[in-house]
Amino acid sequence: MSHEHRLRFKTFVMVLLMVVCANTGDLMLARGMKQIGDVKISIPGLQHALWMTIQNASIWIGICFLIGFTLCYMTAVSWADYSFVMPAGAFGYAIQTMLAIVVLHELVSPKRWIGVLLICFGVLLVGQTKPNTTNVAVLPS
């Protein structure tokens, strides 16, 4: 397997892990905040929201997954271009939209779906490019 193919494969795996962690983390944060309810912008309201947040398991699970996302992201950009990693990870928006419908029971308008499809098309275009275009040597792992 050539260096470029190996780099593309491991970047794909790391971006996939990024998407899973980010989507799960965001979903759990959203679920937790819906359980807490509206946050009132006042000192007592913010104190109450902070206390409820600290006690909410969904939010803690979300935070753990978002830490996982950060670790995967840091790893991916250590060997692939930022301009490749971030757009490639954008296909997570389609997954997030599906999760919003299935888990959070949100309604998604046709205009939003068109936007999601455009993002997915952009991800396909980015995926056709080389993951690393800089002159910095990428160490094999």
Image (cartoon, rainbow, N blue to C red):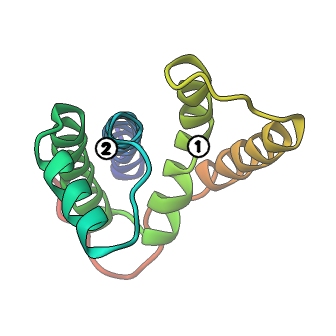
Res. 14 mark = 2
| Tag 1: amino acid | Tyr
On screen, residue 78 versus residue 87, left or right, reads left
Residue occupying image coordinates x 30% and y 63%: 45
Can you give x and y, in whole percent of width and height, for residue 107 in the image? 72, 28
Instruction: Work out which residue is located at the far top of the displayed protein and give it.
Output: 102
Looking at the rendered structure, the secondary structure element under dot 2 is: helix
Q: Which residue is mark 1?
A: 93
Q: Residue at x 62, y 34 (%)?
A: 97
Q: Is residue 88 above or below residue 117?
A: below
* Position in image of residue 118 (x %, y %): 80, 48
Tag 2: amino acid: Met
Left or right, residue 106 beside residue 38: right
Which is in the foreground here, disc 2 or disc 1? 1
Q: Does residue 6 show up? A: no
Q: Quadrant of residue 73?
A: bottom left
At label 1, counting other C-alpha atoms closer than 10 Å, the crowd grade (few under 14, some 14-19, many 20 or more) is: some
Q: Quadrant of the N terminus?
A: top left
Q: Is residue 56 above or below residue 48?
A: above
Q: Nearer the viewer, residue 72 or 141?
A: 72
**Secondary structure of residue under mark 1:** helix
Q: Residue at x 42, y 46 (%)?
A: 8
Mark 2 or mark 1: name the one nearer the start of the chain.
2
- Residue closest to the eye, 119 or 52: 52
Q: Nearer the viewer, residue 9 or 96?
A: 96
Q: Which residue is located at x 56 percent, y 50 percent?
A: 90
Is 109 above or below relative to 135? above
**Disc on res. 46:** none
Residue farthest along the bottom direction in this orientation: 135
